[in-house]
């Protein structure tokens, strides 16, 4: 794998840095974490700035390496995260770009890139746990529509979304992985009810979604009927492969801030803590190299990340939790002060071994698809 950058890629990096240095000081103040309409407007406003400057298409029309450079540089510069638009930009959009028809791409991709529409993810269900193939939300064909009934949980940004990437069961007689279909559901359709969920950190970026005889046009199906599991694996390869790039950069930056804080408050005198921070530094450097390897593999494979994304997701989830445990050690008693930096981030980090596929699921993927071990019974 070639992990070096071409002159054209380095020129793109330099041009992006110059633009970020110019526009970031002009951004308005971030809204309150509880102000979801304000957060949506802020996030989509930033997306529109990227679009107008010619950077929005980096998510789909650029190479994986260009995407890596973009995510690295925007995070280093402290640019806004994709926020409310992350499902559209990092999951649904790339999936539609890879699997959708020409008409579907023309309908859904430009509004995501312009910051006109927000997507949410309707995968998880209350009774399925980590077993995504056990989903029970049903969709029956009725003429040119699917009629959908069921419920979803942990639906990211459902309260401000225009569309939902929705997994439904269209054949209850087929084997579990064979009777699933991937639909794009309008969130304003009759029969859709959204109930926000408040997290341990006090935010409400997730929701329960209840579906009562919701009609979704057959033309909103991405891929063939009952082929949704394969399409979903494309979605999850993006979710586990490149979606966390910016967060790795943020963790590496935070390590530097932790070291500076430890020197200021005297915690740096503890050799055990110093070794812990040093090991984490090595961990995130290795994760960054793994990210580059995965991107290089995606470059050779037509742009879709491979199963190496599961290796990354597995290790990154635990490393992030270890990082915030180290932050609590640096802060001492202040780690209980919700107004201090990193405290709320530590609470949210507890979800990373569950979100985007649990660590147990990632271990199964690594064992079966990379190591070739037999499936458990």
Image (spheres, rainbow, N blue to C red):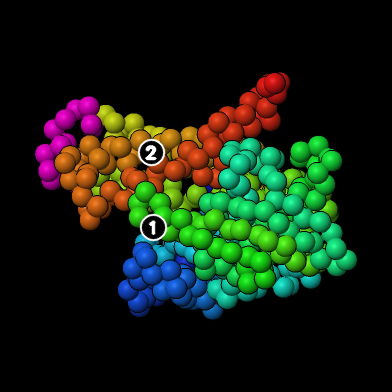
Q: Is residue 273 magenta?
A: yes
Q: Nearer the viewer, residue 179 or 376?
A: 179
Q: Is residue 330 left or right of residue 218?
A: left
Residue 73 drawn at (x, y percent): 44, 59
Question: Residue 312 location, x and y as percent?
Answer: 53, 38
Direction right: furthest residue: 143
Q: Is residue 23 visible?
A: yes
Residue ID at (88%, 66%): 143
Q: Is residue 41 magenta?
A: no
Q: Nearer the viewer, residue 153 or 376?
A: 153
> Residue 215's x, y, as percent?
75, 66
> Who's the residue at 21% across and 40% down the image?
330
- 342 relative to 217 in the view: left or right: left
Please report contact status of discs 2 and 1: CB closer than 8 Å, yes or no.
Answer: no
| Residue depicted at 63% across the width and 53% down the height | 151
Graded by Cα atoms within 10 Å as few (under 14), some (14 to 19) or many (20 or more), the crowding at tag 2 reads many
Write down the residue under mark 2. Answer: 321
**Distance Cα–Cα, label 2 vs label 1:** 19 Å
> Few, some or many C-alpha atoms within 10 Å of disc 1 (few <14, some 14-19, many ≥20)?
some
Q: What residue range appears in magenta? A: 261-274
Q: Main secondary structure of the magenta part?
A: helix
The C terminus appears in which quarter of the rendering? top right
Q: Which residue is mark 1?
A: 203
Along the polypeptide, which appears first: circle 2 or circle 1?
1
Is 159 located above or below residue 308 in the figure? below
Query: Which residue occupies the foreground of this view, 179 or 68?
Result: 179
Disc 2 versus disc 1: nearer the observer: 1
**Left or right, 244 with reference to 190:** left
Secondary structure category for the residue under label 1: loop
Q: SS at mark 2?
A: helix
């Amino acid at each position: 794998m070639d992990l070096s950058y071409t002159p054209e890629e380095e020129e793109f990096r330099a041009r992006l840095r110059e633009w970020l240095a110019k526009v970031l000081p002009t951004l308005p103040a971030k809204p309150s974490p509880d102000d979801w309409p304000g957060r949506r407007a802020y996030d989509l406003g930033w997306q529109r700035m990227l679009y107008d400057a010619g950077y929005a298409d980096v998510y789909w029309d650029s190479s994986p390496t260009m995407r890596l450079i973009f995510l690295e540089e925007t995070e280093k510069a402290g640019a806004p995260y994709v926020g409310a638009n992350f499902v559209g930009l990092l999951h649904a959009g790339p999936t539609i770009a890879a699997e959708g028809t020409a008409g579907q791409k023309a309908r859904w991709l430009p509004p995501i890139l312009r910051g006109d529409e927000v997507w949410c993810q309707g995968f998880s269900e209350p009774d399925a746990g980590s077993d995504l193939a056990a989903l029970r939300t049903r969709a029956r064909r009725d003429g040119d529509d699917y009629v959908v009934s069921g419920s979803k949980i942990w639906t990211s940004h459902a309260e401000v979304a225009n569309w939902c990437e929705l997994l439904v069961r269209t054949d209850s007689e087929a084997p579990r992985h064979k009777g699933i279909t991937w639909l794009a559901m309008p969130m304003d359709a009759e029969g859709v009810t959204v109930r926000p969920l408040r997290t341990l950190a006090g935010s409400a970026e997730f929701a329960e979604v209840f579906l009562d005889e919701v009609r979704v046009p057959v033309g909103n199906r991405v891929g063939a009927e009952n082929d949704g599991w394969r399409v979903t694996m494309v979605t999850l390869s993006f979710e586990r492969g490149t979606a966390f790039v910016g967060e790795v950069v943020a963790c590496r930056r935070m390590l530097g801030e932790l070291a500076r804080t430890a020197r200021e408050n005297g915690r740096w005198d503890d050799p055990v803590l110093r070794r812990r921070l040093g090991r984490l530094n090595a961990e995130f450097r290795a994760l960054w190299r793994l990210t580059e390897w995965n991107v290089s593999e995606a470059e050779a494979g037509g742009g879709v990340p491979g199963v190496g994304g599961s290796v990354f997701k597995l290790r990154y989830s635990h490393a992030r939790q270890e990082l915030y445990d180290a932050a609590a050690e640096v802060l001492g008693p202040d780690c209980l002060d919700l107004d201090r930096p990193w405290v709320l981030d530590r609470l949210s980090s507890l979800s990373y071994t569950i979100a985007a596929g649990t660590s147990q699921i990632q271990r199964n993927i690594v064992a079966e698809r990379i190591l070739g071990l037999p499936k458990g019974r």
